Image (cartoon, rainbow, N blue to C red):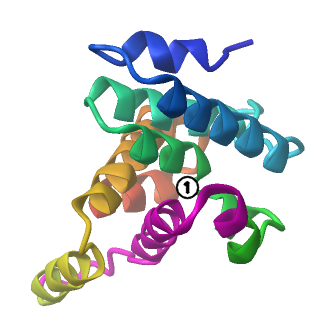
Amino acid sequence: MSNVKEIFNLIEGGISKKEENLIVKAYDFALKAHQDQKRMSGESYFSHLLETAKILAQMGMDANTIASGLLHDVLEDTEITEEELNKKFGEEIVYLVKGVTKLGTLKYRGQERHVESLRKFFVAMANDLRVVIIKFADRLHNLQTLQHIREDKRERIALES
């Protein structure tokens, strides 16, 4: 089984003990929150969160962004509340997680005239560029695992991406 050290091994220059503790806390929290969920491939859903965090670590993102990558689906896909997440991780991480969740509601509708409004909406929702970066890391991992879903859904996800 994978573990949090995979993330640490990808962070260039190392991190402080406080940052390490934050990532471990997010790792453990997300693992527990998603413990019974599976992906279409049959893998644990947590594997997606870990891969998203690893992509963020490879990109040189900060500990709050990596932790948010681990937690990015917790509000949307579990019983965890925003209040609980805020109590455990603080406002900054809640802001990032909520931003990623909101960006996830954007869907490609196949009409060229919506491209510009979609772009504007994307930018307006992402006052913090880290939200977009987390969403892209999430999407990148989803693109790497498209073989496990229906063809029509694969095409929609590819177009959205």
Badge 1, how many Cα within 10 Å: few under 14, some, many 20+? Answer: many
The secondary structure type at the circle numbered 1 is loop
Residue 20 percent location from the top left of the image: 53, 26
| Badge count | 1
Prevailing secondary structure of the magenta residues = helix
| Of residues 151 and 72, the one drawn nearer to the viewer in this rendering | 72
| Of residues 55 and 42, the one drawn nearer to the viewer in this rendering | 55
Above or below, 109 relative to 78: below
In this rendering, position of residue 127 left or right of residue 79:
left
In this rendering, position of residue 134 left or right of residue 91:
left
- Amino acid type indicated by mark 1: His
Residue 54 percent location from the top left of the image: 45, 27
In this rendering, position of residue 30 left or right of residue 23:
right
Above or below, 59 relative to 68: above
Residue 119, image quadrant: bottom left
Residue 108 in magenta?
yes
Residue 80, image quadrant: bottom right
Q: Is residue 101 visible?
A: yes
Residue at image location 64% in from the left, 30% down from the top: 24
Residue 153 percent location from the top left of the image: 50, 58
Q: Is residue 51 visible?
A: no
Q: Mark 1 points at which residue?
A: 72
Residue at image location 38% in from the left, 51% down from the top: 134
Q: What stretch is highlighted in magenta?
A: 85-112
Q: Which residue reaches farthest right?
A: 36
Residue at image location 47% in from the left, 43% down from the top: 142
Residue 64 percent location from the top left of the image: 44, 46
From the image, which quarter does the N terminus lie in?
Answer: top right
Residue 131 in magenta?
no
Above or below, 80 relative to 158: below
